[in-house]
Image: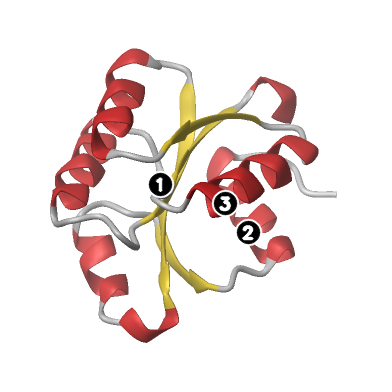
Amino acid sequence: MADTVTILAVDRNARNLELMQAFLEKNGYHVEIASTLDAMDRAILGRRTIRLALIDIAGFDRGIWERCERMRDAQIPFLVIFPRQQAAIQEESLEHGAQGALTKPLAQKQLLGLISGLLGEETE
């Protein structure tokens, strides 16, 4: 089940993106990555197999919300990740179609639970 799921990971920070990709792949997911808005656009338009997106909005301009709306319109569920000191982002994330918003640092077990829930997977 999880080995056929593609998750789009979006983050401006290359190291964070690398860590997220390694974590998700270790847990059986295929991961596409995007570190720019253009790369995110290409992923949204070109990959019909993306089942979920994890979007760390730190470092992106307001154009990130337009991409979030495109994800919503394409019926791709997504979670927004943001720094703890930007708590007002949670409400804006939900307004733009996010299924949830998580503050950093992320709890790995919680993240996997949310991913499984959004994908309709059975948890062990």
For mark 1, give the secondary structure: strand
Give the image location of residue 63, x and y in percent. 14, 48
Give the Cα distance between marks 1 and 2: 12 Å
Badge 1 amino acid: Phe
Badge 2 amino acid: Leu
Q: Nearer the viewer, mark 3 or mark 2?
A: 3
For mark 3, give the secondary structure: helix
In the foreground, 65 or 112 = 65
Q: Earlier in the sequence, mark 1 or mark 2?
A: 1
Badge 3 amino acid: Arg
Give the image location of residue 116, x and y in percent. 65, 46
Name the residue tied to disc 3: 15
As displayed, is residue 18 above or below residue 28?
A: below
* Quadrant in the picture for residue 80: bottom left
Give the image location of residue 20, x and y in percent. 61, 48
Q: Which mark is residue 78?
A: 1
Give the Cα distance between marks 3 and 1: 21 Å
